[in-house]
Image: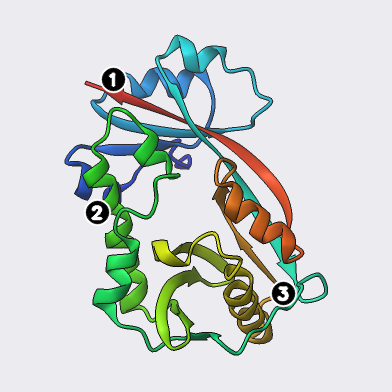
Amino acid sequence: MNKTPLIKTTPWDSAVFGMPTWELLEYSEAVLQCAMGTAGHYTIKVDPLADKQLLHDYGFYYCDTLIEPHCNAVRLRLAQHLDATISKTIDTTQTLAICHTAFAHGRFHRDFNLSKAAADQRYDNWLKQLLEAQQVFGLYWQDELAGFIGYSGNNLVLHALAEQYRGKGLSKYWWSEVCSDLLSSGCEEVKSSISVTNLAVLNLYASLGFTFKNPQDIYHRLVL
């Protein structure tokens, strides 16, 4: 009987970074040692309370901590505004312009071994896939596109606002509407995954009634 692979390829990352990319699915010396035998870029997600000695011994370096916001219909705090609307009718060019360079909090942008331009392209490619699948809500303020939220199932996977709309307290209206739409379509809960360094988004989710769980420290390693 075949065992589940403990190292998986991430071809979407290979395409933008121009090298083999991998994710380690188990934190053990055997898996870390195996990774050292093949060139490429590696990611591993570990419990924040886990002993990190092995990671340091094998040259892995910290990049980010992710946490998952969760909310259901009972806890969701609705916020509405006539000037803030959502729609799946969305202009691809305008949406990609908002996406490009919007993810400075991302672990790929914070990795000193990776090109920031390539990291931008990674998110651009992801958004294109979501747009093709019609899994993106456009966020409109007075009928002008201000941002987007991409989703997969009940998971908000990619979201950003144009710079001029950030920090103005407007996001709660859009996020409230998108979450309400997904919950009314049959999802039992809505969730996401965010960097704990992105305090604006963390505070946004908290203000809407989300709770947080499953923190994970993200470590990277470049094997030459």
The structure residue drawn at horizontal position 23% and vertical position 46%, both measured from the top left corner, is: 118
On the image, the x and y values in percent for residue 219 come to: 46, 29
In front of the other: 126 or 103 = 103
Q: Which residue is mark 2?
A: 121
| Of the image marks 3 and 1, the number of the one nearer the N terminus | 1
On the image, the x and y values in percent for residue 33 come to: 40, 17
Q: Which residue is mark 3?
A: 188
The structure residue drawn at horizontal position 53% and vertical position 22%, both measured from the top left corner, is: 28
CB within 8 Å, label 2 to label 1: no
- Asked if residue 32 can be seen in this view, the reply is yes
Q: Residues within 10 Å of mark 1 (few under 14, many from 20)?
A: few
On the image, the x and y values in percent for residue 207 come to: 73, 62
In the structure shown, which secondary structural element does the residue marked by tag 1 occupy? loop
Mark 2 against mark 1, which lies toward the viewer?
2
On the image, the x and y values in percent for residue 194 come to: 56, 50
Kind of residue at badge 3: Glu
Instruction: Give the vertical position of 39 relative to 6 (above or below).
Output: above
Query: Could you tell me how far apart the alpha carbons at marks 3 and 1 are, in whole angstroms?
Result: 43 Å
Kind of residue at badge 1: Gly
In the structure shown, which secondary structural element does the residue marked by tag 3 occupy? loop
Mark 2 against mark 3, which lies toward the viewer?
2
In the structure shown, which secondary structural element does the residue marked by tag 2 occupy? helix
Q: Residues within 10 Å of mark 3 (few under 14, many from 20)?
A: few
CB within 8 Å, label 2 to label 3: no
- Asked if residue 8 can be seen in this view, the reply is no
Is residue 84 toward the left or the right of residue 8 in the image? right
> Any mark on residue 37, and which?
1
Mark 3 against mark 1, which lies toward the viewer?
3
The structure residue drawn at horizontal position 29% and vertical position 46%, both measured from the top left corner, is: 119
Kind of residue at badge 2: Gln
